[in-house]
Image: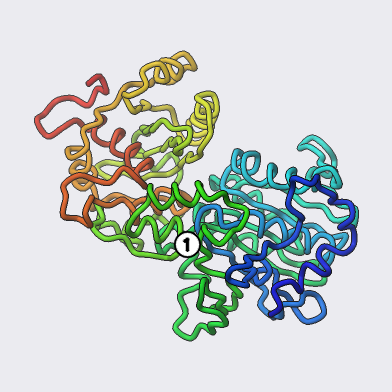
Amino acid sequence: MAASSYTDQFPEPSHSRYGRGEDRQAVRPYYHQDTDVAPQEEFLAGPEGLAPVQSEARNHAFVSGLGAGKTAAGILRSVANAEQWNPGELGMIVAPTVPALKNAILPVMREFGLLDAWEYRGKGSEEPGIHTPSGSRIILESADNDRKIQRLRGPNLSWVWIDEAAAVSERAWEVLSGRLRVGQYRNAFVTTTPKGKNWVYERFYADQDRDVHRSDPYEVVTANGTHGVFGVPSWLNPHNPDDYIDRLDEEYEGEFFRQEVEGEFTKFDGLVYSWFDDNDHILRDDPSPDEYDEFIYGVDWGHGNPMVGLAVGRAGDAYHIVDEFYETRCTNDDLSRELEEMQDRWREGTVYCDPAEPRSIEDLSRDGFHAKKADNSVTPGIQKVSEVRDEFQVCEICQNVINEFDLYQYKDGGDSDDPLKQNDHAMDALRYAILTHTGPDDGQSGSGTW
């Protein structure tokens, strides 16, 4: 592959419309001069006659470290679909949540100048979404609960992109794959930073007979019918400032560094909940509110880190996580709206909150929730969650909770009794709810007023 081959013709039909200021990069794959590679270009593979990088695969994946250009890669492939491969057809971009669309995808489109050339029509219009000069329309959706995933069944699509796919339930991929029914080149693609060896690993990479086309400094692999670019490290993106890479080197270590910076699928050592097993503890059937005696909710505050709200159903001695909200850069109002939707779907119940922010708890109380500060004792909380494990399950749409069970680890690879303060936001919310509601083992009531 010639690293500059795609830049000669991308995107052809209207690329002059994407004029950017001198301080902006072009709407083209980046090229790393020191290593002579262009991972985004290899992700833009397609059938002969459509793309200079040849691949007959219908599914494509770009799995990378933070800041390695995965969202830009998804936008580039979306432009190729809308302008070259499937002009005039319907495509879809799916993010884990609505804030992810607003905070991650649309800003990069705007930076590229695409929203100056493309027309955005809101939800209230007859044909909502982004309309391109070629006549294509791109629907924007989120997939953070089963109701939204079921809504994806409606349109007939020529292509679909799921961003941060490791944070989205596999059910969304299965639903969307069944909607690819129109267009010249029907294709689906995902971009993500890995989150353990979850469904993204199993579906797109884990194949003993995979065909490896490149192995350094990242892998280009055909496996399970997918052409994938895997393990693109953060440092490879030449648009990252040096101090960004330096910060990543300083902040991350071990398996977390390999996952978040090097973009590798990795199994974490010293897991806090090593008993958690996908076969036993993931609820595949869709639960009904009527199956449960009561519902409780757990909240972990965040902004730069994810803000989390969990809905937990209790049926006798069984505890099931049935719904999740998991998003960065959100306000208390955002959380309040999500909790209201959760309680409408399930039932009202006590909301056990991280006690570190009493004013935020007061905000929820003023919004009408039965919000209380939680017992935030770490070791007793972990023990209490482990005590209910025999009848504990997580609904399969709660992908972030499932991910954290496979990532939440003790310090020093398990040699310490203290968990690492990473991959713990859903785990904290779960601990707050279970420990405070059931009470510690000394017989105190779980009133949430510790």
Quarter of the rendering containing residue 181: bottom right
Circle 1 residues within 10 Å: few <14, some 14–19, many ≥20: many
Q: Is residue 251 left or right of residue 215?
A: left
Q: Where residue 424 sits in the image (x, y, percent)?
A: 34, 44
Q: Is residue 380 left or right of residue 23?
A: left
Residue displayed at 53% across by 50% down:
242
> Which quadrant of the rendered structure holds the N terminus?
bottom right
Q: Where residue 366 sits in the image (x, y, percent)?
A: 46, 13
In this view, the residue in front, 116 or 308, is 116
Q: Where residue 308 sits in the image (x, y, percent)?
A: 43, 37
Residue displayed at 25% across by 31% down:
376
**Type of amino acid at the residue the image marks with label 1:** Gly
Q: Where residue 294 sits in the image (x, y, percent)?
A: 35, 33
Residue displayed at 39% across by 43% down:
291
Residue displayed at 45% across by 20% down:
364
In the rendered image, the residue lying farthest to the left is: 442
In this view, the residue in front, 142 or 321, is 142
Q: Is residue 197 left or right of residue 43?
A: left
Q: Secondary structure at mark 1?
A: loop
> Which quadrant of the rendered structure holds the C terminus?
top left
Q: Is residue 32 above or below residue 410?
A: below
Number of labels in the image equals 1
Residue picked out by circle 1: 263
Quarter of the rendering containing residue 354: top left
Q: Is residue 330 above or below residue 406?
A: above
